Image (cartoon, grey):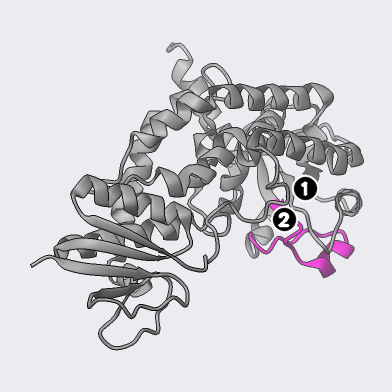
Amino acid sequence: MSENFVLLECDADWSGDPAIVVHWDRTDVASGRLSLPQLVDHNWRQLRDEYLRWIHDCGMSLRPAMRLAPDGPSAWWMTLMAEKSPMKTRTIYTVFRLRAFEILCEMEDAGAVTYVGGNTRVKEVLSSWCSETGRLFEHVPAEAGHTDAPMGRKVSFLPHALRGLAWLLWVWWSRVRRVSKAVAGKREACAAIVTYFPNCDPGALTEGRFRSNYWQEAHDLFDRMEDGVDWIWMYAPSDTLSISEAAVCRDRCNEAGGNQRFRLLEEFVTVAVFSRAIRAFLSLVFRSGKIMESCGAVRMPASRLGLDPVIREDWFASVRGIVAAEAAYYHAAFSRHGGRPAGTAKRSLCLRKPALGSGACLRLEEARCRLRDRPSA
């Protein structure tokens, strides 16, 4: 016999016809009711594997269409979907809960679904899914919980393309123009290490010593290296240090001598480099319509959910918004670094994992593209 399912969001309750009641975001539920967060925890391995296969299939479809330059790296690696960071978007967990709910309905032979909540994106996904699978669907409006839009953005009232342009202009005004170039030495370091700044020991920094919280004891190894190391700091806006203060810290560390040098990524952003970033961003914007169409055609394995409504904002941000602008900016900056202006490392670019999600990985793929296209001896 087909079961009736009721999906409750936030503090919504159900007193209608008998049904299997499932809570969208609560873990402390009454006896006889189900919790989607608990179901996600129980089925995490299956959900993880399906999600990763879905992202892989999307990437295979979209990577060529999202190149930032002919035969160059793809902005795909910086999309919110590829980065998979719950610090930047809640969409991942929303997708997991929807898929867990789909699995539950299939196991219990659900014949009807009632959604009591105010998330219009979830309602749209469930309505389309019920229509496609022959289930009855009803929506009972209720107070909405949090949205699943990318977090931390302050210009959400603007169209995505204008948000991206505003971000680029903000970076130039607040960061690039405030950073003078460091004095470049003539020696060549064995490697350049990209890391976030200022997540480091502030006490050591005042003494002219850089001790990153990411690298920790590895600094002892770098201190003993004969060829030396170039540090490329990716400045993250901070309440503790402004970009101008970060430049002062850089100069203090360079004046301390030793086998290491320090630079801010913004040093490599000239007017020409910044113009290149704007052109790359606008190119993504103009191609974003076709990119979005290709994305919507890919579904999770074994699922009939059309997830476009819940991932739409993430994709808009990634192909025509702030995330796309970040990809264009970091690609241009790292390409300038890869051109080896005076006094930079010649041989390799070592990356700390936290930097991978913010654009340094684009240089890795560009290097891979050059190796692929280099004629064999």
Q: Name the image quarter holding the C terminus.
A: top left
Q: Which of 224 and 216 is in front in this view?
A: 216
What main secondary structure does the magenta stretch of the protein show?
loop
On the image, the x and y values in percent for residue 111 come to 17, 61
Answer with left or right where residue 261 lies relative to residue 10.
right
Marks 1 and 2 sit apart, C-alpha to C-alpha, by 7 Å
- Badge 1 local density, few (<14 within 10 Å), some, or many (20+)? some
Answer with left or right where residue 214 lies relative to residue 265.
left
Q: Which of marks 1 and 2 is nearer the N terminus?
A: 2
Residue farthest front in this picture: 16
- Amino acid type, mark 1: Asn
Answer with left or right where residue 82 lies relative to residue 224.
left
Q: In which quarter of the image is residue 324?
A: top right
Residue at numbered disc 1: 259
Whether label 1 touches label 2, CB < 8 Å? yes
- Amino acid type, mark 2: Asp
Residue 312: within the magenta? no
- Badge 2 local density, few (<14 within 10 Å), some, or many (20+)? few
The residue lying at 22 percent from left, 78 percent from top is: 18
Residue farthest left in this picture: 1
Residue 67, visible in the rendered structure: yes
Q: Which of 214 and 327 is in front in this view?
A: 327
Q: What stretch is highlighted in magenta?
A: 196-214
On the image, the x and y values in percent for residue 54 come to 33, 44
Q: Name the image quarter holding the N terminus.
A: bottom left
On the image, the x and y values in percent for residue 149 come to 56, 52
The residue lying at 52 percent from left, 56 percent from top is: 148
Q: Of helix, strand and loop, which one carries label 1?
A: loop
On the image, the x and y values in percent for residue 88 come to 58, 55
Disc assigned to residue 223: 2
The residue lying at 72 percent from left, 47 percent from top is: 155
Residue 205: within the magenta? yes
